[in-house]
Image (cartoon, rainbow, N blue to C red):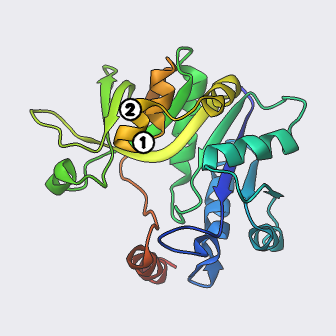
């Protein structure tokens, strides 16, 4: 398998405009994400940018960026456009979609996602989960839960469903992390389909893939990375960077 890591980013985030260039300890957030992805060493890395200022910041840091149409509706559309520009010959048969708002993501998260896709022949799309951070996660609709048929080693499993709803009963709660590894044909099929009924109901695009009949697997990592979605998250990320220079 010959994967590539693509990081979609655009300036017009609803809750935190200009998020990719937000300063975190003297480094733009998108550059921090880029460096974490490069540290994984799993594949070449590029940013699928919706705005020229993101391209400029990435290139100034020595990274690779592709300017995509700013009106593309989703990150998956953006990475498909970047993939077509970077690799029209189809050399890369897999794509790791890493969100541009995870400035401290562990390189191992990218590695386990790529490794699961390579190891499991039935896997069309790989993703990552972590154990719940607290009992409050179980009822928090902002925490997306993955329902998995776990392998005996407890480190990966086939995804049965994803939900924002409360899960009851005994057993662990797996918190979904928004990192995806697509086989190239699965990405194309996913993007060609309109939003599905369950996707619209739960506001979770991975359910579109499941309704299409694509098979998702999830690898377990020890903890969910910090994700920056709003001003409070940004301040927390800055505090983390200051405490962990």
Q: CA distance from mark 2 to mark 1?
A: 8 Å
- What residue is at 61 percent from the left and 62 percent from the top? 33
Q: Residues within 10 Å of mark 2 (few under 14, many from 20)?
A: some
Horizontal arrangement in the rendering, residue 18 relative to residue 178 (left or right): right
Q: Nearer the viewer, residue 234 or 191?
A: 191
Which mark is drawn over residue 168?
none
- What residue is at 79 percent from the left and 67 percent from the top? 55
Residue furthest out toward the left: 169
On the image, numbered disc 1 is attached to which residue? 204
- What residue is at 10 percent from the left and 33 percent from the top? 170
Horizontal arrangement in the rendering, residue 133 relative to residue 239 (left or right): left
On the image, numbered disc 2 is attached to which residue? 198
Q: Residues within 10 Å of mark 1 (few under 14, many from 20)?
A: some
Residue 68: image x %, image y %? 79, 55
Q: Quadrant of residue 118?
A: top right
Task: Tell me the mark number nearer the camera, choosing from 2 and 1.
Answer: 2
Q: Report if residue 59 is visible in the image.
A: yes
If you read the primary sequence from the N terminus, does the residue marked by circle 2 or circle 1 appear first?
A: 2
Quarter the N terminus occupies? top right
Q: Are marks 2 and 1 in contact (CB under 8 Å)?
A: yes
Q: Nearer the viewer, residue 15 or 155?
A: 15
Q: Report if residue 219 is visible in the image.
A: no
* Element marked by disc 2: helix
Q: Quadrant of residue 65?
A: bottom right
- What residue is at 69 percent from the left and 29 percent from the top? 188
Q: Quadrant of residue 200?
A: top left
Residue 53: image x %, image y %? 77, 74
Horizontal arrangement in the rendering, residue 28 relative to residue 158 (left or right): right
* Position of 144 relative to 36 (above/below): above
Residue 35: image x %, image y %? 66, 62
Q: Nearer the viewer, residue 33 or 178?
A: 178
């Amino acid at each position: 398998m010959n994967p590539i890591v693509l990081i979609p980013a655009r300036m017009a985030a609803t809750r935190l405009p200009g998020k990719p260039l937000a300063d975190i300890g003297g480094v733009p957030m998108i550059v921090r994400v880029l460096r974490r992805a490069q540290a994984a060493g799993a594949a070449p890395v590029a940013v699928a940018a919706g705005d020229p200022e993101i391209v400029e910041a990435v290139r100034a840091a020595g990274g690779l960026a592709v300017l995509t149409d700013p009106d593309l509706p989703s990150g998956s559309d953006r990475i498909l456009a970047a993939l077509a520009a970077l690799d029209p010959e189809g050399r890369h048969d897999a794509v790791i979609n890493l969100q541009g708002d995870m400035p401290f993501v562990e390189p191992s998260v990218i590695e386990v996602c790529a490794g699961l896709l390579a190891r499991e022949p039935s896997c069309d799309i790989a993703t990552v989960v972590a154990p719940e951070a607290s009992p409050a996660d179980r009822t928090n609709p902002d925490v997306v839960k993955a329902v998995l048929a776990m392998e005996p080693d407890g480190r990966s499993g086939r995804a049965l469903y994803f939900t924002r709803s409360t899960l009851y009963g005994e057993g662990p709660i797996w918190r979904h992390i928004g990192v995806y590894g697509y086989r190239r044909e699965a990405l194309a099929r996913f993007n060609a389909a309109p939003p599905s009924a369950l996707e619209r109901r739960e506001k979770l695009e991975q359910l579109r893939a499941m309704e299409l009949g694509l098979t998702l697997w999830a690898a377990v990592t020890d903890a969910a990375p910090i994700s920056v979605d709003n001003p409070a998250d940004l301040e927390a990320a800055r505090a983390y960077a200051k405490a962990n220079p």
